[in-house]
Image (spheres, grey):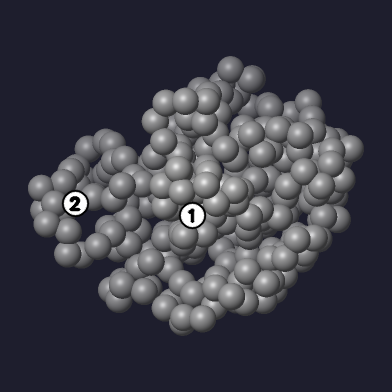
Amino acid sequence: MGDELGGGGMSATPERTYGFRRLAALVHNLVTVAALLGRKPVIPQVPCSFVRNVQSAHLHTVPTSRFGICHASVVATGPAGQPTCHLTPGTWRPGGPDQCYHSAVMSQFDLPRFLAAHGGGARNGSVHVRGMASLAPSSAAGGAADDERGGGGASASYDLAYAKGALDLAPLRTLCKQASAQAELPLLQLDGLLPLQDGLVDRPLPPREFETEQQRQRSKRPRWPSLLMNAELKKLADSCPGARDLIQFRKQCVGYFLAE
């Protein structure tokens, strides 16, 4: 996974930023699909070498940090010679109903215990996400990548590409039907997210939303301009068991839905 993220030898700041956004896009797609399927996403571990490459090389705290890992989205555990890096909970703010408690998702270090409790060697299922280009407008993915690398001017085209009703729901409906046929299996492997791409199953929260919550409420804007809102989710409800709860889950664990 480190190679997929571009974890080797990154040096320029735009390249580091782009690498971390690719990881965020992967997690975004994982949690979106898992929520639609009515399942709990298993948040992957991250190669510590990748974290060292994407974190700022100018942080004065790096030399005194454990294992040289100093990133707000990562917790490092284990021995110095072989640390393991975990993504931190994707919460919006501490406390309140939208706190992303550990019961909302599963960390990868809990997965072996979960499998053991469900028979250990029990057969697991799999579903396949079709190419991201079939789920979201291709111009949107390109705009996001251009904006990432400091291209400037991509935000406007990015907004237009993610217009209301632009998302093709057919691949998501097919995916949900595949999962429903394997509902009795404790674990589903979600294929198709690698190799990493820039496309998203749904639109991420743009950076401009990170003002104050008070400002957002006064603007009467939604917390994020999503493509999977009530109208789309109603169309998916007959195939996707988690569609009716997706908006609430996004509010609870908003940090996992970013591509920033």
Identified at 82% across, 47% down, the residue is 231
Image check: 178 left or right of 110?
right
Of residue 153 and residue 221, the one placed in the foreground of this image is 221
Specify the farthest residue to the top. Answer: 117
Q: Secondary structure at mark 1?
A: helix
Q: Residue at x 31, y 40 (%)?
A: 75
Disc nearest the viewer among 2 and 1: 1
Q: Residue furthest front?
A: 218
Q: Position of residue 238 (x, y in %)?
A: 89, 37
Q: Amino acid at mark 1?
A: Glu
Give whichever of 62, 49 is nearer the camera: 62
* 187 shown above or below 168: above
Query: Cβ–Cβ below 8 Å for labels 2 and 1?
Result: no
**Residue 5 visible in the picture:** yes
Query: Residue beneath label 2, please?
Result: 68
Please count the marks in the image.
2
Image: 145 above or below 85? below
Q: Secondary structure at mark 2?
A: helix
| Point 65% across, 46% down: residue | 32
Disc 1 crowd, CA 10 A, few/some/many (<14, 14-19, 20+): some
Tell me which amino acid carries mark 2: Gly
- Residue nearest the observer in this picture, 180 or 213: 213
Q: CA distance from mark 2 to mark 1?
A: 31 Å
The foreground one among 227 and 1 is 227
Q: Indicate which disc residue 209 carries.
A: 1
Measuring from the top left, give residue 26's x and y in whole percent. 55, 55
Left or right of 169 in this view: 22: left
Pinpoint residue 222: horizontal percent, then vertical percent.
61, 48
Q: Residue at x 25, y 62 (%)?
A: 56
Is residue 203 depicted above or below 32 in this figure?
below
